[in-house]
Amino acid sequence: MNTASTGSDAGTGGEPRWLGDEEQCVWRSYLHATRLLEDHLDRQLQRDAGMPHIYYGLLVLLSQAPRRRMRMTQLAKDAKITRSRLSHAIARLEQHGWVRREECDSDKRGQNAFLTDLGYEVLERSAPGHVAAVRQAIFDRLTPDQVKQLGEITRVMAEGLQPEGTGADLPWRR
Amino acid sequence: MNTASTGSDAGTGGEPRWLGDEEQCVWRSYLHATRLLEDHLDRQLQRDAGMPHIYYGLLVLLSQAPRRRMRMTQLAKDAKITRSRLSHAIARLEQHGWVRREECDSDKRGQNAFLTDLGYEVLERSAPGHVAAVRQAIFDRLTPDQVKQLGEITRVMAEGLQPEGTGADLPWRR
DNA sequence: TACCCATTCTTGAAAGTTAAACTATGTGAG
DNA sequence: CTCACATAGTTTAACTTTCAAGAATGGGTA
């Protein structure tokens, strides 16, 4: 089924409002760009740092955290991934010696993941190449205004997709 | 390593040009938005159509093709995925009876994938919900101008990431 | 024809992801 | 205190993706 068409009936609720020609075109561009970029960065990092993009992002988050350590749940939230996925990811990063776990003092259920020196080195070594790749794909190709627009657009999108409410965590909403 | 920092040395080539504060912020928003949206659509489609977003996209492409069929390589190119990935994907879609393969007349190496009636029905049934999800995440939240900007921005990005040259295929470049 | 190399598509194994179930600890009400 | 329920994190199995290798056909050149 086309995402467009002047189609008729209802799906779940009422009349489905199909996408117009221009919207369709934008949607396709979005899909292509995001898919190509993610693939590109995944390959670049797999080659240069030996890990997929998302794992690299975890190391970055840890490197920026107070004592280079963070609670699992918080890390999962910041990285926008599920706890399950994080568990698997940290397990692997741990195998490489880039990250380690430690019990959490205040909460016996908790675990902290922390970046090892070895992990920091890997990050240090691969950061320049990664930034270059990001720059080449985005910041070097867009005008300053477009960059600003992209920031605002994605901010709005993310806001709308956050689990619940803008607090993205707090038990407000509903 | 931070994607920013006023860091010093070189990576592979010359001085790495780190991202400025604003660029960093945009990049983070981009990652969050795209990750959240992809996850959201994957869950929505897995629930309503029984397949991940990318598989759904394959059915959409097939549904729009001439006789609802397409050469594997062309399909892979249009969907921006590798042939290997496509092979596995089609294999699974075939198991569900949504797609089938047939030999290609003109080239004995070739295969056509075609959308079955059953596949078309699934698409027809799940399209409204999918469009609604896309609309809710993007088109209902952005201003018409932002939508236009997003289209242009992603077009530029995709262009820069295409395998080689804009032809995205032709043996020109280099 | 014989040969070489490109193209098409598939395959198998390893790595990564998901959803659901599960363990263990925290927390509040009664 | 005790029960019920929420939270934190892990685990299992099924599924998806990737990478590298492989089988078969096409095409060009000597």
Image (cartoon, coloured by chain):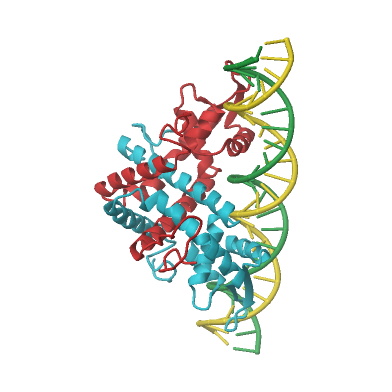
Chain colours: A cyan, B red, C yellow, D green
Depth check: give the residue in front, A90 or A131: A131
Q: Is residue A123 visible?
A: yes
Asked whether, in this view, residue C17 is left or right of residue B23, the answer is right
Q: Is residue A17 visible?
A: no
Depth check: give the residue in front, A14 or A127: A127
Depth check: give the residue in front, A29 or B39: A29
Image coordinates of residue A155 in percent, x first then y, are 35, 59
Q: Vertical placement of A35 versus C2: above or below? A: below
Rendered image quadrant of residue D16? top right
Question: At 49% from the left edge and 77% from the top edge, which residue is drawn?
Answer: A66
Image coordinates of residue C29 in percent, x first then y, are 51, 82
Question: At 40% from the left edge and 37% from the top edge, which residue is drawn?
Answer: A3
Image coordinates of residue B46 in percent, x first then y, are 54, 47
Asked whether, in this view, residue A70 is left or right of residue C10, the answer is left
Image coordinates of residue B145 in percent, x first then y, are 25, 47
Question: At 59% from the left edge and 19% from the top edge, which residue is drawn?
Answer: B104
Depth check: give the residue in front, A171 or A167: A167
Rendered image quadrant of residue A87? bottom right
Rendered image quadrant of residue A24? top left
Q: Vertical placement of A156 versus A6: above or below? A: below
Q: Vertical placement of A81 versus B37: above or below? A: below
Q: How many marks?
A: 0
